[in-house]
Amino acid sequence: QVQLVESGGGLVQAGGSLRLSCAASGRTFSIYTMGWFRRGPGKEREFVGGISRSGGNKYYADSVKGRFTISRDNAKNTASLQMNSLKPEDTAVYYCAADPRGYGSRSQDTYDYWGQGTQVTVSS
């Protein structure tokens, strides 16, 4: 089992940047594929991006591709989401999640462990 805690959310103007972090504790972090998801106001939770166990494979939702970058540091048990060129439609609660089976899926059903989320608000 792993515990996840997100940080780094806040209020930013459109065009600005934020970096979210996800700190993991518990079992060996490197066995998990990590994903980032978000839930906007009045919307369903959606996939943002994911990163493989080693960090060698990264994949993104079309809506954030080219603007967001996922990384991880297995030595520090952390995953990060660098968000650039933010838009008001990026406003959401952002969650990190861990998949112990390493499927690399975009489906939240394959992620067993979730953080509590961190709020990102982008003003126009």
Image (cartoon, rainbow, N blue to C red):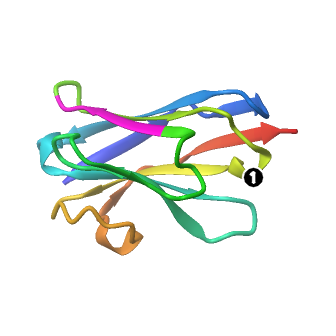
Farthest residue toward the right? 124
* Residue at x 76% of width, y 39% of height: 122
Residue designated by label 1 = 89
* Residue at x 69% of width, y 59% of height: 40
Query: Is the residue 99 above or below the residue 27 in the image?
Result: below
- Could you say where residue 115 lies in the image, as x and y percent from the top left? 42, 50
Residue type at mark 1 is Glu
The quadrant of the rendering that contains the C terminus is top right
Query: Is the residue 67 above or below the residue 91 in the image?
Result: above
Mark 1 neighbour class, 10 Å CA radius: few under 14, some 14 to 19, many 20 or more: some
Query: Is the residue 63 above or below the residue 23 in the image?
Result: below
38 or 64: nearer the viewer: 64
- Could you say where residue 87 lies in the image, as x and y percent from the top left? 74, 43
74 or 4: nearer the viewer: 74
Q: Tell me, yes or no, whether the highlighted magenta stretch contains residue 44.
A: no
Left or right of 54 in this view: 89? right
Q: Tell me, yes or no, whether the highlighted magenta stretch contains residue 72.
A: yes
Left or right of 58 in this view: 19? right
- Could you say where residue 123 lies in the image, as x and y percent from the top left? 84, 38
The quadrant of the rendering that contains the N terminus is bottom left
Task: Determine the image quadrant of residue 9.
Answer: top right
Q: Which residues are magenta?
A: 69-74
Left or right of 124 in this view: 49? left
25 or 75: nearer the viewer: 75
> Can residue 116 be seen in the rendering of this structure?
no
Name the secondary structure under disc 1.
Answer: helix
24 or 101: nearer the viewer: 101
* Residue at x 15% of width, y 64% of height: 101
